[in-house]
Image (cartoon, coloured by chain):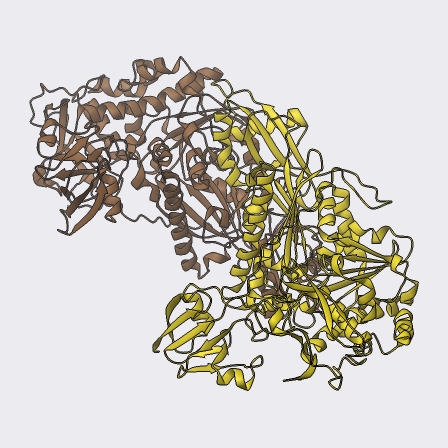
Chain colours: A yellow, B brown
Amino acid sequence: MTDHTVTFTFAETGATATAQVPTGSLLVEALHRAGVDIGQPCGGQGRCGRCIVQVAAGGKVRRRSSLRLSQEDIAQGYALACQSVVEGDLYITVPPQEKIERRLTTDRIASEIRVPDGYEFTWSQTIRRVSVSLNPPSMDDQADDWSRLQTALRTKANIEQINCSIGLLSRIGTVLRESDWNVTAILDMATGETGGLARLIDLRPGIGSEEEPLWSAAIDIGTTTVTVWLVDLVTGQVKAQVAEYNGQIARGEDVVSRIIFASKNGGADELQQRVVNTINGLIELACKRVKAKPEQVVKATVVGNSTMAHLLLKIPAASIRLSPFITAVNHPPLTTTREVGLNLCPEGTVDCLPGVASYVGADITAGVLSSGVYLSEEVVLFLDVGTNGEMVLGNRDWMVTCACSAGPAFEGAGVVDGMRATEGAIEEVWVNNETYEPTYRVIGGGKPRGICGSGLISLLAEMFLTGVLDKAGNVNVDLKTRRVREGDHGGEYVIAWGAETEHGKDIVITHVDIDNLLRAKAAIYAGFTILADQVGVPLESVAKMLIGGSFGKYINVEKAVQIGLLPDMPWERFEFLGNTAIRGSYYALLSQQSRDRVADIAKRMTYIELSADNTFYEAFMSAMFLPHTDMSRFPTVEAVLRKT
Amino acid sequence: MTDHTVTFTFAETGATATAQVPTGSLLVEALHRAGVDIGQPCGGQGRCGRCIVQVAAGGKVRRRSSLRLSQEDIAQGYALACQSVVEGDLYITVPPQEKIERRLTTDRIASEIRVPDGYEFTWSQTIRRVSVSLNPPSMDDQADDWSRLQTALRTKANIEQINCSIGLLSRIGTVLRESDWNVTAILDMATGETGGLARLIDLRPGIGSEEEPLWSAAIDIGTTTVTVWLVDLVTGQVKAQVAEYNGQIARGEDVVSRIIFASKNGGADELQQRVVNTINGLIELACKRVKAKPEQVVKATVVGNSTMAHLLLKIPAASIRLSPFITAVNHPPLTTTREVGLNLCPEGTVDCLPGVASYVGADITAGVLSSGVYLSEEVVLFLDVGTNGEMVLGNRDWMVTCACSAGPAFEGAGVVDGMRATEGAIEEVWVNNETYEPTYRVIGGGKPRGICGSGLISLLAEMFLTGVLDKAGNVNVDLKTRRVREGDHGGEYVIAWGAETEHGKDIVITHVDIDNLLRAKAAIYAGFTILADQVGVPLESVAKMLIGGSFGKYINVEKAVQIGLLPDMPWERFEFLGNTAIRGSYYALLSQQSRDRVADIAKRMTYIELSADNTFYEAFMSAMFLPHTDMSRFPTVEAVLRKT
């Protein structure tokens, strides 16, 4: 096989890099070999188009797929790095890469343990800290170190049987001697899964004060964002809250892309390393704020969707996306931070909470716990929109759940000018119903770079109400305005002219974008319909609509109802709860009863597999319209339309 | 710091190697950097003299210690690599290294489980193999793989709660699918230490036959020799027996040297790797014999002295050799082959049996089990002479034990012409009582290279009975024979002239050698005395003298009594049991009751620390004579002396 030289020039900086690769290599491999990390939000499937590069004239590449490229693009040498096979020496221009900005939330920190109304919270965390002064060994008392420590813990704290890893055992002799036989043991006490055995987590020199913080972490691994709460187990208080993009984003924006990437050679290792790095970085940051050290963190309770749990533990996730959609494990056994690769106390417990199915994970069971769905006397609807959309309908007697592959359209992916809700994103749009001219608000107040989820919802609603869009989502290109025009794939609407944008190009919404958004909202609304039909409860009779996930924080309910994303019900029934997943993780961290309750919730939830439900397609198609084919479901929207 | 070039020339082959090292490096470091492995039987303390090299004239080295070097040696440039500091460019000649020959024992293989008389053996090993056919998942049954497997095992075999490592969990999905949902699970069933939880060890594709072998290993890690028995848990039969030198020998011949080496930078890692390599090699060899694969071996029961157990698990052993002589752990928790680094089934159980104290390890408790000491109605004496000497006096009601730092003199170390019992070793000597001329027998029948333990015992006895040695062990240099002469450190005796030896040099026993041997035998005999005195049982009333360890197989009891190494009692009371340690390990592997019994034995044995016993020194000094100061203890020897 011949080797070829690929020379990369980076448009942004003018820098260059080269790599030698054999015939048949993908351009992403060449980039990798040149030490360049290029984003592959779709996981290398050729679907997202973000790894686009330009091949200089004469360069021999074979394009496996050009789904995202127009004939004109191809004529200009554009190619997708993940789909282009190297067949000769190449000169490649790499356009500026999308920057994923650091986003750190610093929510208000709770000064007390707050739980939903009616929640009987018993503070019963499993970690114990016991300080003991041992009698030093002598010629008359030659007991081995480990027996001596066990005896002391039995005498002082009535702890009968203790397990200890060989790794920790190899350290206890040194700790005992260096601390003159005064030590503090950290133990994880009996839970059912460990057969009632206590487990030694750490042995620290000296007799510590009982008021000293005892650090632990509640962790929510979202497909897009990872959140960590640093919790002092002595007071039960959250002492630091930090969040950051999941480092896996560069290898796929949705779970399916990640699963595909994980199936590639070395992919599972890389994805695990990326999320572990994200968590380690967050823990370090949180610890810095409270002047603690990561190795003092002795327990982590983890929630996340089932794919995130599998990728964290490097358990193959391939069966999640293939019919009949089976997880390897819904409730992973307790493990240690060392096994997972987290830079915390090495023998610290990692407790991944139980999920229900491939697409209803521990983030949802934890959300059901913290949102109080399972306590409610009335029937409530719980929706968690992250990168996917999962929903639960029920009360304290029964719960049904399903997941919609809504896709990340509302996070800006699959939309030409879509972007995440960071600086430069258009977050709200108003369209004049006579001139069809838009006005908009940009995050940060500067020139716009794109449009984020809340902006898209608002835009769709406005376009629909002003008649720019018809019920089927088609742009009315006959309107007397330059804002509407024929694009490559159908009608499109210009939100901002190049002159007013940061990058000098028009910001538009195309027919394809609108179709993607309609699919996403239709999937979610069809989910509501199926759940309600399944149990014979009319959607409008639902007492409360609880919305979890950061998504809810920014969207305008009125507009979301107008496009038919949320059911049409009085506004006061909507409650936005923020991150319900991490709150549930926090409860389970502090309370063994809460943890058992999550397991009970997971058992009690009836999962409805939408792809196996033959009424789903019908419900989905009906919801592909604005707001829906059945206008009687959206009386307030009908009223507005009648007025305009 | 300046770098120096050290050039090594190997006397045996003429090959050369070079290394760059900074000023102040030890020569052993330079050898290591040049990729040369030189033996350090004393662990780098400068005591054994085996790492001797010759520095070419003008080479700047600083000798830290020259304990083992004469003025003449130093004048000729000789230096100990472990004690010589590099201070300039050097040319070094490395003499031929002692070869440790491969020694493989293939004992008769037991066709049935044999136990001592009166031993109630209940075959109750902890490993279970369960084959199950699972219902494949479908849209109507989306249970996760792990729950599906657990349910099947519960239904088929009534196994309630099962634990599984994340590593194994990450494999089960693939195994289930590739085997079309027909699998065989290997489990380690509840023991007290795991809180009654079963643990999944392996999941294999297909429904296996119940007669197929289920492989496990009994392992004895001796300071000198590692022995492995490969056991089929289906029949309980030993299917292969293999043994090999412990790879740690190159870093110290006795436990103290090893502990010192382990305390050096990287030393513990190296020693663990060396013994793990030895075990892996033996398992591979044993598996080859029965056409099995190492990864099919699902459990290993391990015995060894306390230092060997610590080094295997890389638990610091330093406190073992420092007063008050404390182990980090006498009974290590159950662990896995993966944690230890063995190339067996990764989640296979490693069960290190419990020891009693720093110098009475699991090899002795296992030996007490298999030799039947704890069943005996009469008082018996059990001696295990390996590299150390441990002994137990007792019966089914009580047991006392102690260990003597006999040192490896009887294994040929600390004796100028001493060597192990391999080809070329003089194994028996007879001295003519008129001419003082010796005759001898050589292992393998060729020219002698040195003298091994049994040869040394026989030589001492003959020299004593013929008057070459007096009671105090001094060579009578006034005898009319060239065989006795004045050496550097006192009188010496020539066993073989240079003309008749393999290397062309005389084989002699020096005053220092004799002193070392007397110390070793005195330590053992003094141990017997202390144990007997402790419980008020006269030594001569002991009903049986049980001797374990390979040592016993070759020694002549009569001669061992004549030098006062063994007590003077009728020959029929001596029983040589071979390797009692591995036999005990084998029982514990097959029977949970036997394993519990070992733990009970460890608890019931009263350990007497000889260094804390002020009568020991007296007993030791009395035993430094041939055979003893108190001749009434050795009536048969007195009778022989009277005749000569």
- Can the viewer see residue B434 in this picture? yes
Task: Give percent across and percent down for residue B75.
Answer: 8, 31
Report the side of B472 relative to A316 (left or right). Answer: left
Would you place residue B432 above or below residue B52 in this image? Answer: above
Task: Give percent across and percent down for residue A643.
Answer: 90, 74
Q: Quadrant of residue B225?
A: top left
- Can the viewer see residue B37 in this picture? no
Between residue B624 and residue A395, name the one nearer to us: A395
Residue at the image position 45 percent from the left and 28 percent from the top? B358
Report the side of A182 relative to A521 (left or right). Answer: left
Q: Quadrant of residue A640?
A: bottom right
Quadrant (top left/top right/bottom left/bottom right) for the N terminus of chain A:
bottom left
Task: Give percent across and percent down for residue B505.
Answer: 10, 37
Residue at the image position 53 percent from the left and 51 percent from the top? B348
Between residue B627 and residue A554, name the one nearer to us: A554
Quadrant (top left/top right/bottom left/bottom right) for the C terminus of chain A:
bottom right
